[in-house]
Amino acid sequence: MPLAGVIWYDWNPFVLLVLFWIENIVTGAFYVPRILMAKGHKQVDAVNTGKPVRSSNQVVLAVFFCFHYGLFCFGHGTFVFSMFDDPSSGSSYSIEDVFTIIDEFNLSLAIIALAISHGFSFVYNYFFNGEYKKAIAAQQMQRPYHRVVILHLAIILGGFLVSFLDRPLMGLVALIVIKIFIDVKAHIMEHQGKKMPIVPILGKK
């Protein structure tokens, strides 16, 4: 869909970065039920009872995640809008501006597809495959940051490069392909129970 947007709807680096930023929000939304459903335990209190103990109150963790991840997405979004949008559009942005961009560049279908994709992964992998039975709530709270930080460092650096090159089509296509490659690698490693390495990004971990 991003490739179709670049070719047929004249999406530029800013529009792509807005779409990928919205994906962060979609990703975070699915981590709230992940935290709440996690049944794994951080450690066994062998000294006292020998029984598994939960890492923390999962509702508190979920609320804290919403607050902390929300601030993270707000800061990330502010950076994207201030660095890649047209300077003549002004220095302040609002939720209405986001919906305007979604409408202007026909992002609705892509956002729905993102929600379906992440929703399918959550239902199939986390629920039906029983990942929640071994998942630890505190670890689930941290997981999206690994993916988001690594992925968007690459995307933002690529966005700067493509903007500098006056947004050539091949540059945008390359940016999307790189994003998809990193996303797929992160997805596979997540469901193998591994963390995405920051350096080297393509190395074995």
Image (cartoon, helix red, strand yellow):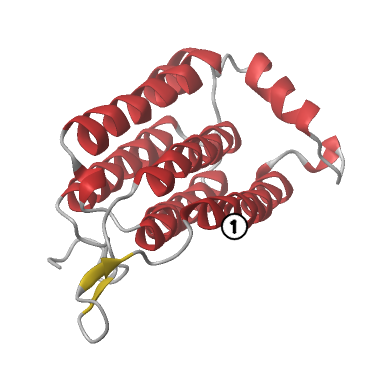
165 vs 146: above or below: above
- 100 relative position to 29: left or right: right
Q: Residues within 10 Å of mark 1 (few under 14, many from 20)?
A: few
**Res. 1 visible in picture:** no
Give 118 or 184, whichever is nearer the viewer.
118
- Please tell me in which quadrant of the rendered image residue 53 appears: bottom left
Residue at x 75% of width, y 38% of height: 86
Residue at x 67% of width, y 16% of height: 104
**Res. 60 visible in picture:** yes
Q: Amino acid at mark 1?
A: Phe
Residue 201: where, in percent of width, then height?
26, 63
Residue 63: where, in percent of width, then height?
59, 51
- 119 relative position to 128: left or right: right
Outermost residue on the front side: it is 49
Kindly identify which residue carries mark 1. Answer: 64
Q: Quadrant where the N terminus lies?
A: top left
Residue 152: where, in percent of width, then height?
46, 52
